[in-house]
Image (cartoon, grey):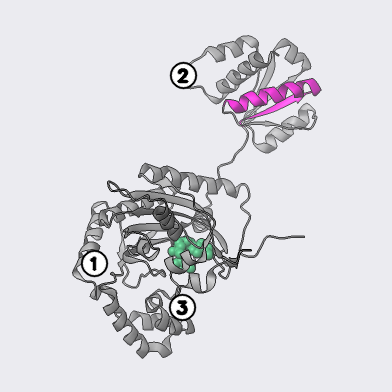
Amino acid sequence: MIKSIKGTRDILPPESALWSRVENTAREIFERYGFAEVRTPIFESTELFARGVGADTDIVSKEMYTFEDRDERSLTLRPEGTAPVVRAHIEHRLQQETSIAKLYYLGPMFRRERPQKGRYRQFHQIGAEVLGSDNPAIEAEVLEMLQFFLRLLGIQDQTLLVNSIGCPACRPQFLEHLKRSLAEKKTGLCPDCQRRSETNPLRVLDCKVESCQPAIESLPKISDFLDSACRAHFEKFLGYLASRQVAFTIVPRLVRGLDYYTRTTFEITSGALGAQNTLIGGGRYDGLAEALGGPSTKGFGFALGLERILLVLQDRGNPPDPLTPQVYLAPLGERAFDTATLIAKCMRENGIRCFLDFDARSLKSHLRLANKLGSLYALIFGEVELQAGNYQLKQMTNGEQTTLTPDELMRAAESSGQADLRTSILKALFLARSTYHF
Ligand code: ATP
Ligand code: MG
């Protein structure tokens, strides 16, 4: 038997309904805040990520799915969404003089990591980017939006962690001190951190290994090295968060693993997750567009891990929206079935979730299936009833059954205003009869 690849998952019903709910909530809220969707290709030239994410990062150095195409060009399955969005922004000259660009995306990302709970090789992100401004008020607005989004999903247990990692003007001084301090503490660090302290010392701060923590605690803090512009930016950002009543915690060790980040960085974590507790990560990346060969463009954005949002929702026993039928059609006999196909067409065109089985069934067997599917109503008719224009409508929740007559259907069709489900079913049935002449 052929199985799915390690680190990938099939998203099956009913879990897939929960996915749609999260995606739809994101779309609705992000669009309300002025973000428009972009869809970039699943694969890009390897160079985009080498330059845009940084060769020293874990992503580029060991996690990418890179392969040579038949024309020997090196391609990579996208491991993240920011570099592709910025590439598209440059390529299509989306930079506008008058306004910032607000873009969001959702879709699969690929990283060859060790699969575990909340960590996959194909995983899904929803992200958004604001391009064209370095105003800290934008950062606060994005965080307000994220908090609203999580609240709508019912995720209360979340913490916003913030920090500033300075800019190319002030970070080198900090890195000097950091390197010197790391050299003294090298023996107390894990092998990964020993390597990082040479190649990407900032990343040591981000290490999650327990035995590294005492050494990390005693390292210099970047907040002591910010220049006056970066400090002012950070303070404004915190002030805006406070006035919008967005709660936060400053974490001096919070850095992002990606080279292009400047100034504001943040994470939203959830206590409901275990070791992989980061739900959302993001920050400012004022140097990225230039690193990709475009005009200087300030940027701020985030990416959230959909699998982790789903883990939190499932932990809370959040039941997926059941897509149960609103009406089950129970035709008795072959001619009644043929008519049922037309009723089903009309019901569906008029917004009713309608179920029609393709096997010939007895009344008893129909009702058993309607019950099993959780249908709200069953519409029962045989050939004799069709001739007379009479139908049995059974409310499955209480077993109440009424006979629908042509008069009653006509009255429903003529009624105006917001229709309840029963009236909508009657209206669609009337429409089916007059359209298909039965
Ligand atoms: P982590 O420290 O958990 O590896 P990261 O720094 O690599 O995270 P980002 O690149 O900032 O994460 O990605 C943003 C979000 O995407 C993360 O906060 C997380 O929710 C999610 N994410 C990242 N990698 C994976 C993965 N392999 N599987 C599932 N979700 C992931
Ligand atoms: Mg990672």
Q: Write down the quadrant of residue 114 in the picture.
A: bottom right
Tell me: residue 40, above or below residue 424.
below
Left or right placement of residue 266 versus residue 25 in this view = left
What residue did someone put label 3 on?
A: 209
Q: Amino acid at mark 1?
A: Cys
Left or right placement of residue 200 versus residue 378 in this view = left
Identity of the residue drawn at 80% across and 29% down: 360
Q: Nearer the viewer, residue 11 or 39?
A: 39
In percent of width and height, residue 19 lies at 54, 49
Q: Helix, strand or loop at disc 3?
A: loop
Distance between the alpha carbons at the discs numbered 2 and 3: 62 Å
What residue did someone put label 1 on?
A: 230
In which quadrant will I find the C terminus?
top right
Identity of the residue drawn at 77% across and 32% down: 365
- Label 1 lies in ligand 1 vicinity (Cβ under 8 Å): no
What residue did someone put label 2 on?
A: 417
Tell me: residue 209, above or below residue 367.
below
Main SS type for the magenta part? helix
Residue 376 belongs to the span the image colors magenta: no
Mark positioned earlier in the residue sequence (2 or 1): 1
Which of the two discs, 2 and 1, sits closer to the camera?
1
Graded by Cα atoms within 10 Å as few (under 14), some (14 to 19) or many (20 or more), the crowding at tag 3 reads few
Residue 246 visible in the current orientation:
no
Magenta stretch in the rendered image: 326-350
Residue 332 belongs to the span the image colors magenta: yes
Mark positioned earlier in the residue sequence (3 or 1): 3
Left or right placement of residue 426 versus residue 158 in this view = right
Graded by Cα atoms within 10 Å as few (under 14), some (14 to 19) or many (20 or more), the crowding at tag 2 reads few
In which quadrant will I find the N terminus?
bottom right
